[in-house]
Amino acid sequence: MNMIKYEYLLDGSNKSTVLSDAITLDGVEFIKLSNVNDTPETRKKLYELVKEGVIDDPGQNGIFETFDQFSKKIFGHYWKNNKTQFLATYKGEWIGLCSITIDKEKKVAKCGLTVVKKRYRGYGIASYLKNLSIDYCRSEGLLKMVTEVDESNYPMMKINQQNGFKRVT
C-alpha cells in the first residue's frame, strides 16, 4: 500500500469548499459516539459500519476481521475516544463515521477511518463528518490535523482536498 499524507492547519489558512448545509438526504443526524451507550447492539452497529468501509476501501484486500477479533482489538479505542468519533445516523441505522485521535501534547489530531455505507454515498455525509471533526479540533485548540489515504482511494483523496486538507507527500 502506498499512502499519501495530508494535513489541515487549524490556523484558518485552509479553507473547505464544502458547505455545511450540503447534506442532500433529509433525516440524517450527526452525533458523537459518546452520545450512545456501549451495548452489544451499538457494538454490532459500529462493527458493521467499519467492516463495510474497510472492505470497500480500494486500498484493502476485501478481508475484514471477525466481530470477536474486532471487539478485542478495536472497541477499546473507539469507546476510550468516544468524544472524537463522529457518527451519521439515518432512521436508527449507523451510516457514517469519522474517527480522530488527539495528541494533546503535540496539539495534533490524527484522522483515522472516515466511512459512509455505500448506499448513502453521494449525499455529502463524509464531508459533513470531516467538517464536524475539524470544528471539534478547532474548539480544542489544536494546531493541525493529519491523515493518510491509500493512493488508489480517489474518493477519499477528493473529500480531503475539498475539505481543505493539503497533500504533503
Image (tube, rainbow, N blue to C red):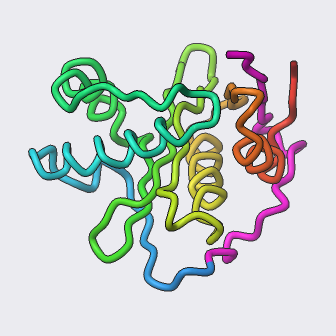
Using the rendered view, name the quadrant where residue 63 is placed: top left
Quadrant where the N terminus sits is top right
Asked whether residue 67 is drawn in magenta, I would say no
Identify the main secondary structure in magenta: loop
x and y, in percent, of residue 92 in the image = 27, 70
Position of the C terminus by quadrant: top right
Farthest residue, direction front: 62
Give me the residue at 9% from left, 45% from top.
40
With respect to residue 149, does 125 lie above or below? Answer: below
- Above or below for 93 versus 165: below
Residue situated in front as seen by the camera: 22 or 104? 22
The answer to whether residue 11 is magenta is: yes
| Percent coordinates x, y for residue 56 in the rendering | 53, 42
Which residue occupies the foreground of this view, 70 or 78? 70
Q: Residue at x 42, y 45 (%)?
A: 52
The residue that appears at 77% across and 23% down in the rendered structure is 5
Horizontal and vertical percent for residue 84?
Answer: 44, 40
Count of number-bearing discs: 0
Q: Is residue 9 left or right of residue 59?
A: right
Q: Report the side of 74 relative to 107 (left or right).
A: left
- In the displayed structure, does residue 80 sit left or right of residue 140? left
Outermost bottom residue: 26
Image point (69%, 75%), residue name: 22
Q: Which residues are magenta?
A: 1-23
